[in-house]
Image (cartoon, grey):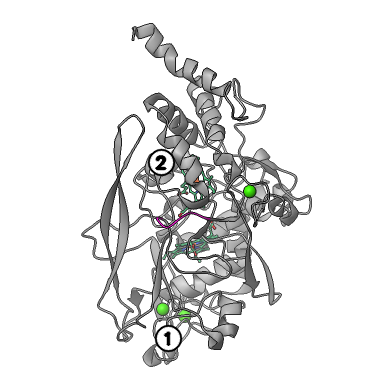
């Protein structure tokens, strides 16, 4: 091919393909306001602090509340009894002593390096197959906990209590081939537990590895009206596009009702307050008005006998401050929205049908929990629904109504700043993907068709698709 033609070829091929049978739109220019992923809350910060800024439309006094919440998210909690009574009660069992140790720079966590001694910034969830005798606990927790270890492995403990065990990861690898012959190696983690502190686990224990997700835009996701989310649900795939998103239905601790789930990799949490309280309780061993006592199981007797930091350890006041913080971490604006390669990538994103799950935009409710979050046109690139992602991504551990193959569509806003904020680019629920392309190649199940389209892309098209994702 002559050089000029070679340069024009990708655009030409794109143009030709766009005239084909599929009805995917072609984007020749950016839409007005397209860069403002979080509406007027969008922040103009693109360095390693890009995920740590308050919503841009917060008034100065509200920024003060944000920084108070931030201190409880960032600063470590201590073992009781202690002189700092507002921050004591860590453990007896815990994963780490501060939220920020996992949600590093308010961004995502990562799997441990192959030889790392411990695994911070991720969790291993545990359960056993549920029988009729578990009906009550399954209604409230969505799972039947492992009898000795509960619903989560805590690899740390206060002095006098045995930690539950150590987590290491091994990887198996497999190769994927593009139509043009290019090969990519994918890796899949295999969980290895050692130094178990409370005897053997149940022989049918189900384990699910989870990386801490980024913290941006969560208040906006919470403010999307439920009807708007349900409008995208198509559980029986009546429109025949092979995609059958459905909401998770989870337990609300406050109202004691079953409601739609929105947070966590399987949408197992109904809202931010409960998600935060659950993190305090299970990840750090701190009780609150939502979760009293400790995460120790019946069999963990020394754990149950340890002193606590007051009941509750996390006051309603602190819970409210952390809630305000987690609602108001602003989403950074997009970069290069009008770049021809980014626009070509956006066209390809639609051609592959990515937007059927990664739904581009919503308008938040007029009666959002905070006025700054109301009536915002936002672009999260998620439907917050569960999708069967195939055997490759399956953890074989159901959570409420999510099956062992279902995951919540991960929001893509901010994803292009992952390397800048976190210093790595490991994606998906267990951090197995080492870059965005690997993340796409793990898509299966309802997303298999989209994956097949991408496998047909040539180098130029792959680069364009990745440029689009990097611009989010
Ligand atoms: Ca405690
Ligand atoms: Ca446990
Ligand atoms: Ca469908």
* Residue 300 pos. (x, y %): 39, 89
In the foreground, 93 or 232: 232
- Location of residue 6 by image quarter: top left
Compared across the picture, whether 177 is left or right of 273 comes to left
Viewer-closest of 163 and 237? 237
Q: In the rendering, at what x and y percent does residue 258 appear? A: 68, 72
Residue closest to the eye, 178 or 264: 178
Q: Which mark is residue 147?
A: 1
Query: Range of the magenta residues?
Result: 388-392
Q: Residues within 10 Å of mark 2 (few under 14, many from 20)?
A: some
Question: In the image, what residue occupies the spot 58% across and 40% down?
Answer: 355
- Looking at the rendered structure, the secondary structure element under dot 1 is loop
Task: Say if residue 292 shows up in the picture.
Answer: no
Q: Indicate left or right for 454 with 138 as reference.
A: left
Label 1 neighbourhood size at 10 Å, few (<14), some (14-19), many (20+)? some
Estimate the x, y position of residue 250 in percent, counting from the top left: 62, 69
Residue 303 against residue 25 in the figure, above or below? below
Quarter of the image with the N terminus in it: top left
- Return the residue at label 2: 436
Mostly what secondary structure, the magenta segment?
Answer: loop
Q: Nearer the viewer, residue 341 or 97?
A: 341
Q: Earlier in the sequence, mark 2 or mark 1?
A: 1
Locate residue 88 relative to residue 41 in the image: left or right: left
């Amino acid at each position: 091919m002559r050089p000029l033609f070679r340069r024009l070829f990708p655009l030409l091929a794109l143009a030709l393909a766009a005239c084909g049978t599929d009805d995917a739109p072609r984007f020749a220019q950016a839409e007005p306001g397209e860069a403002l992923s979080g509406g007027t809350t969008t922040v103009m910060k693109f360095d390693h602090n890009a995920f740590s800024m308050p919503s841009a439309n917060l008034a100065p006094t509200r920024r003060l509340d944000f920084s108070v919440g931030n201190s409880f998210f960032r600063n470590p909690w201590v073992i009781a009894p202690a002189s700092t009574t507002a921050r004591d009660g860590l453990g007896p069992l815990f994963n780490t002593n501060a939220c920020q140790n996992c949600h590093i720079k308010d961004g995502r966590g990562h799997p441990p390096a192959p030889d790392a001694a411990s695994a911070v910034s991720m969790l291993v969830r545990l359960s056993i197959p549920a029988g009729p005798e578990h009906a009550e606990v399954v209604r409230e927790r969505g799972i039947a906990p492992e009898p000795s270890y509960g619903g989560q492995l805590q690899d740390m403990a206060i002095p006098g209590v045995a930690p539950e065990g150590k987590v290491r990861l091994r990887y198996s690898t497999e190769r994927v081939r593009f139509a043009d012959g290019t090969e990519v190696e994918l890796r899949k983690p295999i969980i290895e537990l050692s130094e178990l502190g409370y005897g053997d686990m149940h022989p049918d224990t189900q384990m699910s590895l989870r990386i801490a997700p980024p913290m941006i835009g969560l208040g906006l996701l919470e403010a999307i009206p439920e009807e708007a989310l349900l409008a995208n649900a198509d559980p029986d795939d009546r429109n025949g596009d092979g995609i059958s998103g459905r909401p998770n239905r989870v337990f609300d601790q406050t109202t004691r009702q079953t409601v739609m789930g929105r947070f966590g990799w399987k949408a197992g949490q109904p809202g931010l307050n409960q998600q935060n309280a659950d993190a305090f309780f299970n990840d750090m061993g701190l009780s609150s008005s939502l979760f009293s006592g400790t995460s120790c199981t019946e069999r963990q007797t020394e754990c149950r006998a340890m002193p606590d930091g007051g009941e509750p350890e996390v006051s309603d006041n602190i819970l409210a401050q952390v809630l305000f913080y987690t609602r108001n971490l602003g989403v950074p604006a997009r970069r290069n929205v009008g770049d021809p390669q980014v626009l070509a990538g956006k066209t390809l994103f639609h051609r592959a049908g990515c937007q059927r799950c990664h739904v581009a935009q919503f308008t938040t409710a007029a009666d959002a929990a905070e006025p700054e979050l109301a009536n915002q046109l936002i672009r999260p690139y998620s439907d917050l629904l569960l999708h069967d992602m195939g055997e490759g991504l399956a953890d074989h551990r159901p959570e409420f109504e999510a099956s062992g193959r279902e995951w919540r569509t991960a929001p893509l806003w901010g994803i292009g700043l992952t390397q800048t904020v976190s210093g790595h680019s490991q994606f998906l629920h267990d951090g197995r993907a080492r870059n965005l392309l690997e993340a796409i190649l793990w898509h299966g199940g309802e997303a298999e068709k989209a994956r097949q389209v991408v496998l047909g892309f040539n180098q130029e098209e792959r680069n364009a698709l990745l440029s689009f994702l990097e611009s989010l």
